[in-house]
Image (tube, rainbow, N blue to C red):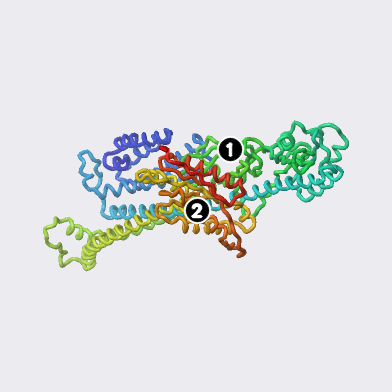
Amino acid sequence: MTVIAAVLLGPWYAFLTAMMASTGLMLIWDSPHVYLFFGLEALFLGYARRQDIYALYADAAYWLFIGAPMTYLYVVYLMDIPPSHLGFIIAKQGVNGLIYSSLASLLILAIPNLWFLKDKVKDRNRRRLSSQLTYFFTLLVTLSLLFSALIFNFYFLERQQVMLKQHMTEAVAHLSTSAQNYIENHKTVIKNTANQLGLVADKPEQWQAILSNLHQSYPGFISMLIADPAANIVTASPASRRLYLQQTTQNNNIKDRDYFIESFYNHRRFVSSTFLGRGFGDDAIIAISAPFYLDAQHTHVAGIVEGSLNLIHFSHIDQVDEYADDESVVMVDEQNKIIYASAKLGLTPLAPFKFAINKGVYRANLELLNIHNTTSIAPEYIYAHRQLTNGWTVYVLKAFSPLLQLAEEQMFSSFILLLISLVCTFYLSRKLSALLTVPLEAVANQFSQPETGKALTIDENSPKEVFSLYQSLVASKQQLIAHQMELEQTVAKRTAELEKANKKLTKLVDRDPLTGLYNRRYAERKFAELVDFCLRSEQAISVVLLDLDLFKRVNDSYGHLAGDECLRSVSQLLQTYFKRDIDIVARYGGEEFLLILPLSNALHIEHHLNSFREALSQLDITSPENKQSFKVTVSIGAITANADHNVQLDKWIKVADDNLYQAKQQGRNRAIITIIADKSS
């Protein structure tokens, strides 16, 4: 609207329009610079119009000589944006200016009635046809190239973001798995050591040899020790610490340490929070401890064994070749304290990990955050994260600037291509206009006559080229109409295909991609409908939770592909046993499945569930990797009650989950069902 007002009404109307239009941007961006930039642009375009300068040429000059320098100064001195973002911001503002000035100019040409305003600005000199043709061709080429470049850049950057997001997701998954395995393996080591010490609990002279051999096998422990029931350290490893204990009697008692208290008094394996090691390095460590016993009944504690796990192990991830130079890693514990951070980030170990999720001016399909300048509107990093089972979180960070630099390069390439194309178009258009001016006047006269129902003709003395052009224009008009009709048919066909695809997409949203079963969200949404259905017929509903027994052993023994194949096989068997249209068979999460069975018969449901359980226990499942066969069993917890028992699915699941827990406690591979009678009885 600002450009239209500048072309038709002059600078001051354009300035007023710009001020009104900028108010909306001011409310969104909360930055007064919009009044200055767009106000000056409106005045510049208005005064250029009075000098008979076309809007596109004037706007290009404005952004080249005024807008770009002003944007540079404003961003450098008044905005908290890194210098690396300057090129992209300036190029984007210039391209935006060319787009809306081109669109406004074409709109003016397309709606001739705009020219009949009473107070419109008139040309000081009548324009030549060659100039008008040149400007028109320039507008078309400018818009075509701009939109083509923008669409190409959009899909290119979109693809880059998808690939980047997939890469970072895979990276954080790999790191999370490595970290989890590292901790779990050393927890298992401490547990096994405690069991081994329990065998020689009455022979303290053998403890040192066991501890030293173990420490040599697992150098991830920076130090290890054994303490007696009085909390005195009786032996330790490495040799330097053992020698230190022999030479001093200070600090040999650990009765105030959490790892002693939890293991000795609470009789459990304990993993401490992260802390800085003292005496054996200043790296972040955790203490893992476990008790060992004098008797087989585990009633008399002979002592505790403790290992200080050195978390500097995680620094090796920065040397793995698959990570790019501009990627970094941060690992924090359950208290959000930094366990490890790539050196390039400059973060202090065990300091709180302070960051801000960036919701600034850049629209990206990636998760963005700021670490060093949390108040900046410019994002510093793209990130992906995953939480471990012990509450730790792994972050993979990738600098945002390379992606912005890529967008900037694309923008500048498009801009250079545009300039070259405009120069060529301008030159060729002027040459073409000079050759066509006189013949086109005749064609214009023919087409400017009002339609009388008779076909317009060109004078017989007209040049052959003009007559051919005239015929071509008529034929082109007919072809355009035919093409439009064909396009309308194509659009109708594509619309139908899109509706079909949307229906298919809706179906996919409700399905678990691995098993093909309904997902948890679908089951929760459909439960209310099934309750209403059963209430009308006063029928019972069964809600069943199934959990595969010792499923982790399948993944550990046969691989994760075998685990996936196992879940698919169980899902197929479930669909065979529970195949009514009204039955809901869903994957509840992990190796758990949820059944919602309306119109249930309380006398038959337990038999049917046990039939499924027995059939599953006999099912041979083949690992895709090594073709080994294995079997799995399932524990089942269920509740059968009238539909008016409770309208909330969580209440049903709570009873089923309690029964599932009992089934697990009673030895697994069994079904426990609660049948709730009618409330009225």
Q: Is residue 448 above or below residue 244?
A: below
Q: Which mark identifies residue 372?
A: 1
Task: Name the kind of residue labelled 1 in the image.
Answer: His
Q: Secondary structure at mark 2?
A: helix
Is any atom of residue 39 visible in this view? no
Q: Is residue 32 above or below residue 198?
A: above
Report whether 484 appears left or right of 287.
left
Where residue 374 sits, quadrant-wise, is top right
Where residue 437 sits, quadrant-wise, is bottom left
Report whether 369 appears left or right of 254.
left
Residue under the image location 43 percent in, 34 percent down: 31
Residue 4, percent from left and from top: 29, 42
Distance from the alpha carbon under mark 2 to that under mark 1? 62 Å
User: Which numbered disc flags the more N-terminal residue, 2 or 1?
Assistant: 1
Q: Which residue is mark 2?
A: 607
Q: Secondary structure at mark 1?
A: loop
